[in-house]
Amino acid sequence: MNPDLMRHMKRAAFWSLCHLGVTFAVRDLLGLLHLNLASEMTPYFLFVQPATGVRVLVAWLYGWSSVLYLLPAMCVLLGFGYVTDMVALKEPLVLLGVMVSAPLAFSILKFTLGGVSQPSAMLAHWRPLLLVGFLAGMIKGSAIMLALHDVIPPSRHLFSLLQITVGSLSGTIVVLVLVMFFFRWQRFYQQWRRGSVAGDHRR
């Protein structure tokens, strides 16, 4: 098999599994809390949407290719009737908004500010990623409001948009914190391994 194709398939498998894992974890948590909410109403209640953080992370790493890498996850969610960020994907506009929100937010930020921090400098320049999470939430929330305007009472449109945006931002913060802890743990483990090996040689 072509090595490039294999690399893309591995990325799609890995990141789609990450996205599905986060989505199901949030769904199960709501189940444990007995929050069995209708899919079109849950944007009122969910203030942390880590799946948005995963999409921001993948879009930051791979740009618009992230849409293809996360497509398997979206197909699974759509095929089995699950929800992502507690928003039903049955509406095409919602599905489109969810899929393109993060790379589109990066494109907007690059156009307006002239660039975004590169992967090698993420820990030093994390603020642009939070801004992307905020913009992605606005884009996704706008798509949801357009698709579900006849379900959500007009008096709650603005509040729901704000809540979805805040949930996307907080979800991005959660994912970035987890990634930072992982990098620190990895650095600590490597230092410990080097020290262990050096100790063995001294003996």
Image (tube, grey):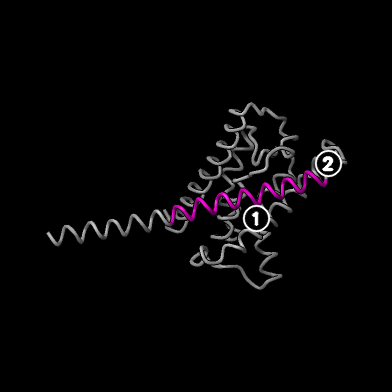
Which residue position is annotated with label 2?
Answer: 156
Quarter of the image with the C terminus is bottom left
Residue 166 covered by magenta stretch: yes
Q: State the residue in front, 108 or 156.
A: 156
Q: State the residue in front, 177 or 74.
A: 177
Residue 122 at x, y percent in the picture: 52, 63
Q: Quadrant of residue 44?
A: top right
Q: Specify the amino acid type for callout 2.
A: Arg
Give the overall secondary structure of the magenta segment: helix
Which residue position is annotated with label 1?
Answer: 133
Which region shows up in magenta?
158-183
**Residue that sits furthest to the right in the current view:** 154
In the figure, is residue 50 to the left or right of 18?
right
Question: At 68% from the left edge and 71% from the top edge, which residue is drawn?
Answer: 113
In the figure, is residue 26 to the left or right of 151?
left
Tell me whether circle 1 and circle 2 mark residues in contact (CB < 8 Å): no
**Mark 2 surroundings: few (<14), some (14-19) or many (≥20) residues within 10 A:** few
Question: At 45% from the left edge and 55% from the top edge, which residue is drawn?
Answer: 7
**Residue that sits furthest to the bottom in the current view:** 114
* Mark 2 secondary-structure assignment: helix
Residue 171 at x, y percent in the picture: 61, 48
User: Sequence order check: which comes first, mark 1 or mark 2?
Assistant: 1
Q: State the residue in front, 65 or 60.
A: 60
Q: CA distance from mark 1 to mark 2?
A: 22 Å
**Mark 1 surroundings: few (<14), some (14-19) or many (≥20) residues within 10 A:** many
Question: At 55% from the left edge and 50% from the top edge, which residue is drawn?
Answer: 175
As drawn, the label of residue 189 is: none
Residue 122 covered by magenta stretch: no
Residue 35 at x, y percent in the picture: 66, 29
Q: Specify the amino acid type for callout 1.
A: Gly
